[in-house]
Image (spheres, rainbow, N blue to C red):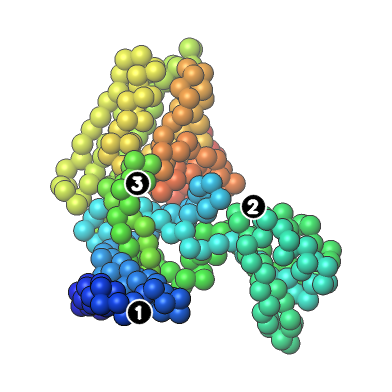
């Protein structure tokens, strides 16, 4: 199809000649107009496919963001060349299934601006095939909203899986995946990774293990005054060297916290670790930052703040938080914790 670029140029010159000769120009004919437009669309699609790049990615984390009325899946990982990458994909929408719902529910959903599509499907439920609806909505929060609204009217299915996990399941994406797409300069400033890519397609690739950049840190604080005295860090990046690099932040507490944040943004570690950081160091830093009116700690790869998780840990979007204490506890089973 690469030759079509030249073929279309030839057609345009011929059309100009036909028009000058007083003949009917094919693209001025209403029916042929559609054909020309269709050809242009196909040509653009082929040109876009020809320009696509590919990256083999080892996934580390998955999330999503809402940008206006759009939902964007965000995959974070490392490439085969050991570059950090954010993969954006906006063609997957949240949905749920309704088994044999009353007719009035279908009508209400079709007239609802929060619902993008209502489709008839068949589902294998309790040993038999049953009529059902696949309801596609605008944002993930609407799945829970309508599940709760209609749960007493019919059986709701495929509604209890987190949106980004549903994406991974539906697209059958494993720990390593080949991403076809284009680099996204428009949104690059919103992330700390070396690469930001808009994905068009996902394919299977051979598994691989990239070198991960690991940041380990520890804080020292005053028991009497409650302030942070220093934050010490070590970083190892085997993609570059076996050496470890040490950092020690001192000065005012405000400077210590901001310099630590700057290190995370600048070095962009894949893994952040330490001993008992989930229960002590991270919440301590967050409390002190709030006390000092530091408005936002950009610890996530999408420059967002740390978020607590349901299991007592912390989420730095796009990074792995590996608290050494949990591993020690799992292996040693201590009877007493201090």
Q: Earlier in the sequence, mark 2 or mark 3?
A: 2
Q: Residues within 10 Å of mark 2 (few under 14, many from 20)?
A: few
Are discs 1 and 3 less than 8 Å apart at CB?
no
- Observer-side mark, 1 or 3, equals 1
Which residue is depicted at the point 73% across and 61% down?
111
Q: Position of residue 18 (x, y in %)?
A: 27, 78
Look at discs 1 and 2 and give the one toward the viewer: 1
Mark in the foreground, 2 or 3: 3
Q: Quadrant of the N terminus?
A: bottom left
Q: Residue at x 47, y 58 (%)?
A: 90
Image coordinates for residue 292, horizontal then vertical, percent: 47, 17
Q: Are marks 1 and 2 in contact (CB under 8 Å)?
A: no
* 2 and 3 marks in contact (CB < 8 Å): no
- Residue bearing mark 2: 141
Q: How far across and how far down the image is residue 8, in percent? A: 25, 74
Which residue is rendered at x = 43% and y = 69% of the image? 173
Residue at mark 1: 24
Give left or right: position of 148 versus 160: right
* Figure quadrant of residue 182: bottom left
Reading the image, the residue beneath label 3 is 186
Instruction: Indicate which disc, 1 or 2, sits on the residue closer to the N terminus.
Output: 1
Answer above or below: position of 69 versus 199: above
């Amino acid at each position: 199809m690469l030759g079509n670029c030249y073929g279309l140029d030839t057609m345009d010159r011929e059309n100009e000649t036909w028009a000058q000769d007083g003949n009917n120009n094919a693209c001025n004919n209403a029916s042929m107009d559609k054909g020309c437009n269709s050809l242009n669309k196909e040509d653009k699609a082929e040109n876009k496919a020809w320009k696509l790049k590919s990256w083999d990615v080892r996934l580390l984390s998955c999330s999503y963001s809402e940008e206006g009325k759009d939902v964007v899946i965000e995959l974070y990982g490392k490439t085969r060349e050991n570059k950090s990458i954010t993969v954006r994909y906006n063609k997957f929408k949240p949905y749920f299934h309704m088994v044999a719902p009353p007719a009035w529910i279908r009508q209400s959903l079709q007239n609802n601006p929060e619902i993008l599509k209502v489709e008839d499907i068949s589902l294998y439920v309790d040993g038999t095939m049953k009529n059902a609806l696949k309801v596609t909505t605008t944002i993930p929060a609407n799945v829970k909203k309508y599940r709760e609204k209609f749960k007493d009217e019919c059986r709701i299915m495929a509604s209890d899986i987190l949106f980004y996990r549903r994406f991974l399941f539906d697209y059958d994406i494993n720990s390593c995946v080949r991403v076809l797409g284009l680099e996204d300069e428009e949104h690059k400033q919103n992330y700390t990774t070396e690469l930001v890519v808009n994905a068009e397609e996902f394919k299977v690739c051979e598994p691989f293990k990239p070198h991960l950049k690991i940041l380990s840190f520890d804080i020292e604080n005053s028991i009497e005054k409650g302030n942070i005295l220093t934050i010490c860090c070590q970083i190892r990046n085997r993609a570059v060297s076996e050496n470890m690099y040490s950092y020690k932040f001192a000065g005012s507490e405000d400077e210590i916290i901001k310099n630590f944040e700057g290190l995370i943004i600048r070095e962009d570690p894949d893994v952040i670790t330490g001993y008992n950081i989930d229960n002590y160091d991270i919440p301590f830093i967050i409390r002190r930052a709030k006390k000092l009116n530091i408005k936002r700690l950009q610890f996530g790869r999408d420059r967002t703040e740390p978020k607590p998780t349901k299991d007592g840990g912390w989420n730095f979007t796009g990074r792995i938080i590996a608290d050494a204490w949990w591993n020690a506890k799992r292996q040693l089973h201590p009877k007493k914790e201090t």
